[in-house]
């Protein structure tokens, strides 16, 4: 089992910035990839970005150039630096961890609310 706890959400004005953090505990040595998803009411959860243990990253096109994902493997932490935020970024953001071997498992945190509003 992997436990994930997010922090850093809140309310920010359009054009502002926020940094989300997520701490993993439990079977952290088995984690291959960590990332962030987001979800708004009535919509499916969508990938925001992920990062592998080797530092490979992938971003949703809608956040490229504005968001940066990073990690500290020694601390079992993953971060999401969000800049140039717009109201369309308003969502609950979920931390995610994927284990690939010996079988695929995915874990999500409880989520943190990000609200972009003037």
Image (cartoon, grey):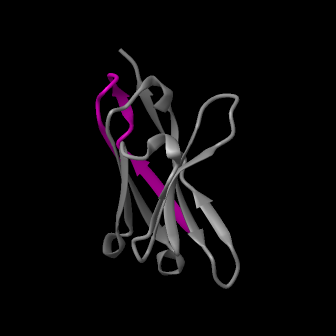
Residue 94 x, y percent position in the rendering: 53, 48
Q: Residue at 70%, 79% (x, y): give it.
A: 103
The foreground one among 61 and 37 is 61
Residue 43 x, y percent position in the rendering: 68, 33
Residue 11 drawn in magenta: yes
Compared with 23, 48 (above or below) is above
Relative side of 48 to 86, left or right:
right
Q: Residue at 70%, 29% (x, y): give it.
A: 42
Residue 51 drawn in magenta: no
Residue 44, visible in the rendered structure:
yes
**Quarter of the image that includes the N terminus:** bottom right
Residue 100 x, y percent position in the rendering: 63, 77
Compared with 10, 104 (above or below) is below
Q: Extreme bottom residue here? A: 102
Q: Extreme left residue here? A: 16
Residue 1, visible in the rendered structure:
no
Q: Residue at 52%, 74% (x, y): give it.
A: 31
The quarter holding residue 38 reads top right
Q: Residue at 29%, 29% (x, y): give it.
A: 16
Relative side of 34 to 11, left or right:
right
The foreground one among 50 and 79 is 50
Q: Which residues are the magenta region? A: 1-20
Label total for image: 0
Main SS class of the magenta portion in the image: strand
**Quarter of the image that includes the C terminus:** top left
Relative side of 34 to 46, left or right:
left
């Amino acid at each position: 089992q992997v436990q994930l706890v997010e922090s850093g959400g809140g309310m920010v004005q359009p054009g502002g910035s926020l940094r989300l953090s997520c701490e993993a505990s439990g079977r952290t040595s088995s984690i291959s990839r960590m990332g962030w998803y987001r979800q708004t009411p009535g919509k499916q959860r969508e990938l925001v970005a992920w990062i592998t243990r080797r530092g490979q990253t992938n971003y949703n096109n809608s956040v490229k150039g504005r968001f940066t994902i990073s990690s500290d493997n020694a601390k079992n932490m993953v971060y999401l630096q969000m800049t140039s935020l717009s109201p369309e970024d308003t969502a609950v953001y979920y931390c995610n961890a994927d284990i690939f071997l010996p079988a695929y498992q995915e874990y999500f945190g409880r989520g943190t609310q990000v609200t972009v509003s003037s």
